[in-house]
Amino acid sequence: MGLGLEAHGERESLIRRDQRSEIRERESLIRRDQKSERIRERMGSSGAVPFWRAAGMTYITYSNICANMVRNCMKEPLKSQSINREKVHFSFSKWVDGKPQNPTIRSDTLP
């Protein structure tokens, strides 16, 4: 009878050990989910965040960087044409007493 009780006690301790390991595994998963939820909240989105946003850029900044890289990779006849297209022409004037003053015309290249 002594062996039966010892075997029963070992079996109970194995069951308890398995239950403790399952509980630890569940707690680990819960902590990981909570951590990823905090990251999503910090990013301001419940889904995946685009890499340009994670890098602290706006989409306009990212697209300008990409466009400049593409222009620099072009061969010469197309490269000079695309660089000329990037120039911006605009005019502005100061308004005094509800009337526009002489307009100033500017031509700039985008950064």
Image (cartoon, rainbow, N blue to C red):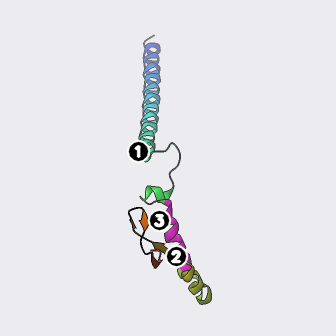
CA gap, disc 1 and disc 2: 31 Å
Among the two numbered marks 1 and 2 on one chain, the one whose residue lies closer to the N terminus: 1
Contact, mark 1 vs mark 2 (Cβ under 8 Å): no
In the rendered image, residue 65 lying in the magenta stretch gets the answer: yes
The image shows residue 30 at horizontal and vertical percentages of: 45, 33
User: Residue 106 falls in which quadrant of the image?
Assistant: bottom left
Is 101 situated above or below 31? below
Which residue, as the protein is rendered here, is positioned at the far left?
Answer: 96
Contact, mark 1 vs mark 3 (Cβ under 8 Å): no
For residue 105, say whether it is visible.
yes
* Circle 3: residue type: Thr
Residue 69 bears which disc, if any?
Answer: 2
User: Residue 97 falls in which quadrant of the image?
Assistant: bottom left
Among the two numbered marks 3 and 2 on one chain, the one whose residue lies closer to the N terminus: 3
First to last magenta residue range: 59-71
Label 2: few (<14), some (14–19) or many (≥20) C-alpha neighbours in 10 Å: few
In the rendered image, residue 79 lying in the magenta stretch gets the answer: no
Residue at image position (49%, 44%) is 45
Dot 2: element: helix
Label 1: few (<14), some (14–19) or many (≥20) C-alpha neighbours in 10 Å: few
Contact, mark 3 vs mark 2 (Cβ under 8 Å): no
Residue 42 bears which disc, if any?
Answer: 1
For mark 3, what is the residue? Answer: 61
The image shows residue 66 at horizontal and vertical percentages of: 53, 70
